[in-house]
Image (spheres, rainbow, N blue to C red):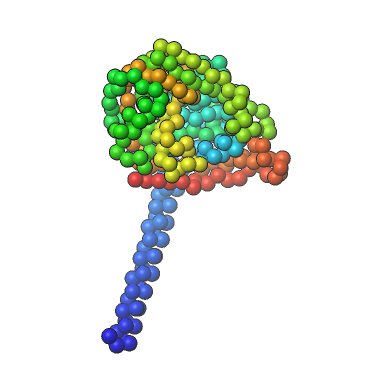
Amino acid sequence: MNKKSLLVILVLLSVTFFSGCTSSADNFSETAGNFERIENSGSEIRGNDSDVLYQISTIDALLQGVYDGVLPVAELETHGDFGIGTFDGLEGEMLALDGNYYQIKTDGIAYPVSGETTTPFATVTHFEADENFRLDEPANLTELEASIDLKLPSENLFYAVRVDGNFSSVKARSVPRQEKPYPKLADAVSSQSIFEFKNVSGTLVGFRTPEYVEGVNVPGYHLHFITADRSAGGHVLDLELKDGDVAFDITREFLTLRREVPFLDSHQAGRWGMKAVNFPTIYFFKF
């Protein structure tokens, strides 16, 4: 091959390479543009695609003591009828089921939530079961999770999980409202209230998220419980299932919502003298 031919080939390869880069950048920009429009109009997604998992803030922020509510429940409801989370000041456990939102306080009672109540962290979706199956054998929490895992098509997807069942026991908790400067979550839960439900019927509500989102959400299962009469519940610590019906919804998109979050109005505020940072939409997964 002479030098002239080699030069032509190199030029063609260069044009192809840079053209591909430009195309990729254009595609990325287009995707980002669509994502921005989606984020700013939750109702638009709701009409077109219910397989979306919406989240406010991150679990790491909550662990660090970011408890100030940033989104009203009235707005959160437009993004999902099923989910879990917490409330302003970390007051109690959030549970959303069949479009009804509850706040389970330290007395264990599930209170209906007003639209003005705000949340610092929540994960919700519009639940539409992709698979249902029956469990007729007793199972503890670890065994229940393992049974569900066997039915999942992949461990790398996001799942909304619902279990309607009869339980020999459910051990649950709720955390009281915290005062500023906010402690880290590990310290806040030291004052938690723990409830023991015996021979009770009710529903588990929660999510299974992949290991690679550690820090964004809780890897593995995160479940809350509410009794069949919707009067009591909490964050699940342990359980013994007698029998029940399991349903899971594969959520093929995961979005965190943009809000201004007062990250440093927690225990760090006095140390760094900063009040707030803009919390951008930094995570978007689609499968």
Residue pictured at 28% horizontal, 31% vertical: 131
Foreground residue among 99 and 96:
96
Q: Is residue 120 left or right of residue 81?
A: right
Asked if residue 279 shows in the view, the reply is: yes
Q: Percent x, y for residue 81?
A: 40, 28
Q: Is residue 154 left or right of residue 191?
A: left
- Quarter holding the N terminus is bottom left
Check the image and name the residue furthest to the top: 199
Report the side of 272 relative to 150 (left or right).
Answer: right
Residue at image point 54% right, 19% down: 194
Q: Which residue is found at the position 31% from the left and 79% from the top?
A: 9
Can you give x and y, in whole percent of width and height, for residue 104 in the image?
51, 20
Q: Is residue 165 visible?
A: no
Residue 121 at what x, y percent from top left? Answer: 52, 34
Image-quadrant location for residue 150: top left
Q: In the image, is residue 117 above or below residue 56?
A: above
Compare residues 279 and 287 and report the one nearer the observer.
Answer: 287
Residue 229 in which image quadrant: top left
